[in-house]
Amino acid sequence: MRAVKTVIVLLVICAGIYYFLGSGFSKEEKAAWKEERLHTKETEMKEKETPEKLTSADVDVEESMFNWVGREARELEEKLGDPERIDQSSYGYEWWVFTDYENEYFQFGVMDGEIVTLFATGNEVEYEPLEIGQDYEQVQAEFDFGQEVTLSKGVTSYRFRLTEEQLKSEPLVKVDDDLFLQLYFDTFTNSLSSFRLMNADILLVQRPYEIFYRGKLPEAPVLTDGEWTKVQSGMEQQIFDITNIYRHRFAKGKLDWDDPVADVAFGHSKDMDQNNYFSHYTQDGKGLKERLAASDISYYTAGENIAAQYTDGPAAVEGWLNSEGHREALLKEEYTHLGVGVHKYYYTQNFLQKP
């Protein structure tokens, strides 16, 4: 029996940190909060027109959300039409993204023409018996939350073990032998923030919890640099979109995408990944203030969230939402612009208040 702790990478448990900059910033003003994990990219964000109203009913509540995993992608096209975009993932599937940019956000993972996973969030997302915004206790009454979840594939057995913190913030539910539900809760409001469905193969490849197993573990595909560039670009856009979905949830202003700031964020994620460190300061002591100045970026105030080794972009945003300092940056009313940079599994958000 072997155990793998997926939150441990490069022999360290990474922490997400929030960093705030104003005029006359000094190291003493730095504020750091603990968390876990992160991811990477290069930048190409474009403004899109808001689509016609997308509703949860469009995704067939009557048939139940659980029925979508395992169905053919063509059925999704017939029901919802073309996705807003298609992003690559690091796990072998494509993310088909559908959103109205305010109240509803869906990512359907498609592999070989079949839906293998989905992620959903937004104020108006409702799938009986789930509804975004439900109290933890209400959801717990519908599902069995336990600290251990098991599954078997042939002669191989696997057992996931959740920490007490994970049980509160991201419990895992076994729907059937090949379908699993991951629930993300906002621990500040004790309410359902988002959810993810996946088949057993995707769960085993992603391994978001400590795992014990007999036999072999499936591995994620090995990506080329060009493939990573596409994956990273998609995650950056996902983080940007979900950040604005959550700001809308809490009645905060929408952030505008900023290409130069995204380049700065990407450079920091890449530097952390390639030089094996995790900090708001580079190894030569340069912080966000210096990095923005080097790119001649002007602003009133600025802030930074970093994270490492999260499964993907949506998971990183949920992690920030549940950390006091990161949440403050994510929902700060004064911020007007955002640049996101992802490199492999290192993630950076740079927020700015501009004139």
Image: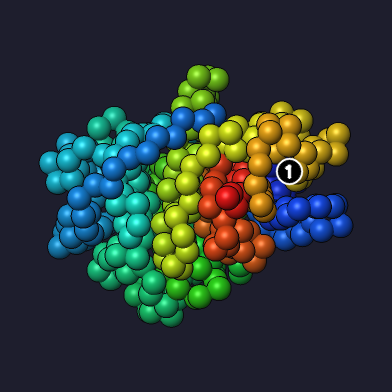
Across and down, in percent, residue 84 comes to: 29, 39
Across and down, in percent, residue 108 comes to: 32, 44
Between 244 and 21, the one lying in front of the other is: 21
Q: Amino acid at mark 1?
A: Leu
Between 343 and 304, the one lying in front of the other is: 304
Q: Residue at x 55, y 20 (%)?
A: 225
- Residue 192 in view (yes/no): yes
311 sits left or right of 241 in the view: right
- Residue 159 in view (yes/no): no
User: From the viewer's perspective, is residue 40 above or below residue 149?
Assistant: above
User: From the viewer's perspective, is residue 230 above or below residue 282?
Assistant: above
Q: Which residue is mark 1?
A: 288
**How many marks can you see?**
1
Q: Residue at x 60, y 38 (%)?
A: 261
Secondary structure found at label 1: helix
4 sits left or right of 196 in the view: right
Q: Residue at x 51, y 62 (%)?
A: 170
Instruction: Residue lying at the far front in this picture: please name it.
Output: 355
199 sits left or right of 351 in the view: left
183 sits left or right of 113 in the view: right
Across and down, in percent, residue 200 comes to: 39, 47
Crowd class of label 1 (few under 14; some 14 to 19; many from 20; radius 10 Å)? many
Q: How is the image coloured?
A: rainbow
Across and down, in percent, residue 325 comes to: 67, 62
Tell me where residue 168 sits by quadrant: bottom right
Q: Residue at x 25, y 32 (%)?
A: 113
